[in-house]
Amino acid sequence: MGIVYQTDKRSGITYAYENQSFWDPELKRSKSKRKLIGRVDPETNEIIPTDGRCKKRSPSYVPNNEEYQMPKTVKELKEEVIRLLKENAELKRQLADIKN
């Protein structure tokens, strides 16, 4: 058993995996299974535990107060849709003004 580090080419994030090697008698060769441990902090090279799906599920995630909060009721959702439609119309108008 060992730790394997792999860098995601798209995001540049390095992840740490626990590597378990075993012999496959059918294929007559060694194989390995990997289990994600977490992200590697580029500054400290410390492994930050994560489940690999979303930073919100990571134990080290700290929510930002300025982040968007999803509406919790249907009424709030309708109000949010109306607000976004108005914002979209305003942005389209501004874009048309810039083009002219």
Image (cartoon, helix red, strand yellow):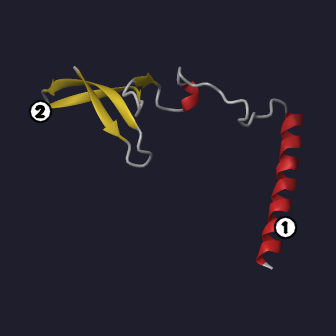
Residue 61, numbered label: none
Task: Look at the numbered disc 1 and give the secondary structure of its residue.
Answer: helix
Q: In the rendered view, tell whether residue 87 sits above or below residue 75.
A: below
Residue at image position (72%, 30%) is 65
Relative placement, left or right, of 64 versus 7 is right
Relative placement, left or right, of 9 versus 21 is right
The N terminus lies in quadrant: top left
Q: 73 or 44: which is nearer to us?
A: 44
Q: Distance between the residues labelled 1 and 2?
A: 64 Å
Residue 29, numbered label: 2
Q: Which of the 4 quarters of the picture holds residue 29?
A: top left
The C terminus lies in quadrant: bottom right
According to the picture, the residue beneath numbered tag 1 turns out to be: 93
Q: Which of the 4 quarters of the picture holds residue 94?
A: bottom right
Q: Which amino acid does label 2 sit on?
A: Arg
Task: Look at the numbered disc 2 and give the secondary structure of its residue.
Answer: strand
